Amino acid sequence: MTVTSDRLPMLFCEVEVVSVERLSPSFVRVELGGPELADFGVDGPRYDQRIKLVFPDPLTGGLTTVAGADDSWFSTWFDRPVAERGHMRTYTVRDVRGTGVETRIVVDIVLHLDGDAVGPGSLWAAQAAPGDRLVMMAPRRGFPYGGIEFTPGPGAEVLMAADETAVPAVCAVLEQLPSSAVGAVFMEVPETGDVVDVRRPDGVSVTWLPRNGAPLGERLHAAVVAHLGTPGAVVEVSPDEVDPDLWETPSYSSSGEEIEASRTVGHELDGVYAWIAGESKVVTGLRRHLVRELGMDRSQVAFMGYWRRGVAMKS
């Protein structure tokens, strides 16, 4: 029996795995369904829409209940024992299939299975099977939800850069861009086998950057600065300078700073909108190059630390 809470302005319900597909060595695609998803929806393009998934605890199988949840649920969730509540992580809606009670939400999950700190999402996805259940928090049609950071101005030239954690978001955006869109996209992935075809407008170039053993972010940084006409530029970022919660968009800054225009009209990067997401240190280096070195206006960029190497994410 499906459990849900219809007392909240967002969808908060149990969903079931409908299908699982291994896309590549590092990515698993999971299709999730449930009758409550008939109410999923956003106002306008969903672009890089984020949702929350709560995975069962791998040791106990414990999964939070959504029955009777009210507005206080999220603020008290972290106070509950992990063995009972499970583990929450953030993902992008890669695609939406079907309509009504047959609506399915597609999520692509990165398999980080190397090293000592394997995340609960990767662990779950590596063994996911049809019929498995988890909890989803997502937009309910007709109610504000947030979670969309891709907001270019009309006619803006798009610049997108991502590591594997942000590849699903970039691919979702590419498939929703108008045919007239122009720009360049750079995606770094663990290995050559992770390169896949993705629909895109003819005016948007896509460059895949398999690491194949190279240091994380090295190829991505080099490709972006070369595209901007500054090949070889390296921005040093020490570990203590990295904000693990780095999140800066034209309307929000995790540092609390006001985002306002900071340059004069006529700058060479006028008309460019940058969306950069991935590991926080890599994103910080690219942010400094664009904003500090090249003088790009902070109101035209979105820099998001999706994860921080060596730091466990809370949600």
Image (tube, rainbow, N blue to C red):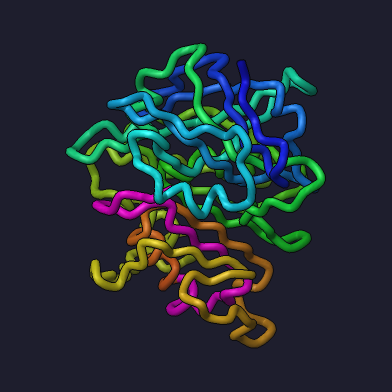
Compared to 39, does 291 lie above or below?
below
Relative image position of residue 231 (x, y in whole percent)? 38, 64
Relative image position of residue 138 (x, y in whole percent)? 63, 40
Relative image position of residue 57 (x, y in whole percent)? 35, 30
Please give the range of residues in magenta: 290-315
Residue at 46%, 75% in the rendered image: 255
Q: Is residue 222 left or right of residue 302?
A: left
Q: Is residue 265 left or right of residue 228?
A: right
Magenta-span inclusion, residue 308: yes
For the question of whether residue 226 can be seen, the reply is yes
Q: Which residue occupies the foreground of this view, 67 or 243?
A: 67
Q: Which residue occupies the foreground of this view, 111 or 262?
A: 111
Relative image position of residue 219 (x, y in whole percent)? 34, 50
Residue at 22%, 34% in the rendered image: 114
Residue at 24%, 52% in the rendered image: 310
Compared to 224, does 173 lie above or below?
above
Compared to 187, does 96 lie above or below?
above
Residue at 81%, 45% in the rendered image: 142
Quarter where residue 273 is shown: bottom right
For the question of whether residue 192 can be seen, the reply is no
* Rendered-image quadrant of the N terminus: top right
Magenta-span inclusion, residue 262: no
Q: Is residue 115 left or right of residue 167?
A: left
